[in-house]
Amino acid sequence: MTTPGAAEAAATPAANLLTVRPATAADDAFVDDLQAIAFGPGRFARTAFRVRERFPIDTSLSLIAEVDGVSCGSVWMTPISVGGMKGYLLGPLATHPNFRKRGAGKLLAREVSKRALARGEGHFVLLVGDQDYYCPLGWEITTPGAIQFPGPVDTSRVLLMAEDKSLAKSLTGPIAAFEAGR
Ligand SMILES: CC(C)(COP(=O)(O)OP(=O)(O)OC[C@H]1O[C@@H](n2cnc3c(N)ncnc32)[C@H](O)[C@@H]1OP(=O)(O)O)[C@@H](O)C(=O)NCCC(=O)NCCS
């Protein structure tokens, strides 16, 4: 009887290895199902959905999270502008119920924002979400009503992340096309 050596132990995959990769067309069915599970039939009535109807998502910024190589989460980004400034609307962000509380959601939010802003074109990442979840990740509360959505929105959930820390309070205007900004 021998005990496993270091080489054998190293060959054993790490448990719960969390990774992120770009989404492909092969992920479409998984993402559709996941969004239906996470948001239900009411998802099409959400104001953020109306933004995505007007302005297409950038599929090159769609990411999938995996646990040990199994798809478990998804995030999308929509290029937009507000008040003549280019940025992105993050969402939907969803993790499959079987894989929650392992860090996938926060990893996806952080990673997609980093990749989008690293392009050097957009200056902020806007979203509609819970302060308790997003503010510890760097999102900040905006001035209520300053950023105008194409439908009703709970203004306390309109959050913004930007390198310029004054932007969350100063950005104002309707959500418009990415191309309308600079
Ligand atoms: C929100 C969601 C994406 C989080 O995914 P996740 O992979 O479990 O997130 P993480 O593992 O990175 O973070 C989990 C932590 O955030 C907390 N959390 C989850 N949702 C939260 C919320 N709405 N507000 C505050 N905290 C929240 C969890 O309790 C957990 O806390 P813990 O680490 O102290 O246990 C997932 O629950 C989900 O898909 N929900 C349904 C869709 C949704 O609401 N999307 C967000 C829209 S803005």
Image (spheres, rainbow, N blue to C red):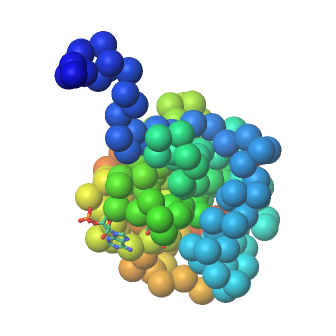
Q: Nearer the viewer, residue 150 or 157?
A: 157
Quarter of the render that holds ligand 1: bottom left
Q: Closer to the camera, 43 or 139?
A: 43
Q: Give the percent coordinates (x, y) of residue 82.
A: 59, 59
Q: Position of residue 169 (x, y in %)?
A: 36, 64
Whether residue 141 appears in this view of the structure is yes
Q: Is residue 16 above or below residue 133?
A: above
Above or below for 72 versus 52: above
Instruction: Check the picture and name the quadrant holding the N terminus.
Output: top left
Q: What is the x, y in percent for residue 138? A: 31, 53
Q: Residue at x 21, y 19 (%)?
A: 2
Q: Residue at x 59, y 64 (%)?
A: 92
**Residue closest to the far front:** 1
Q: Is residue 151 above or below residue 50?
A: below
Please report the residue visible at 24 percent of the width from the left and 15 percent of the height from the top: 6
Instruction: Name the image quarter holding residue 36.
Output: bottom right
Which quarter of the rendered picture does the C terminus lie within?
A: top right
Residue 149 visible to the viewer: no
Occupied quadrant, residue 141:
bottom left
User: Residue 181 or 120: which is nearer the viewer?
Assistant: 120
Q: Residue 173's image quarter?
A: bottom right
In the shown orientation, is residue 179 left or right of residue 87? right
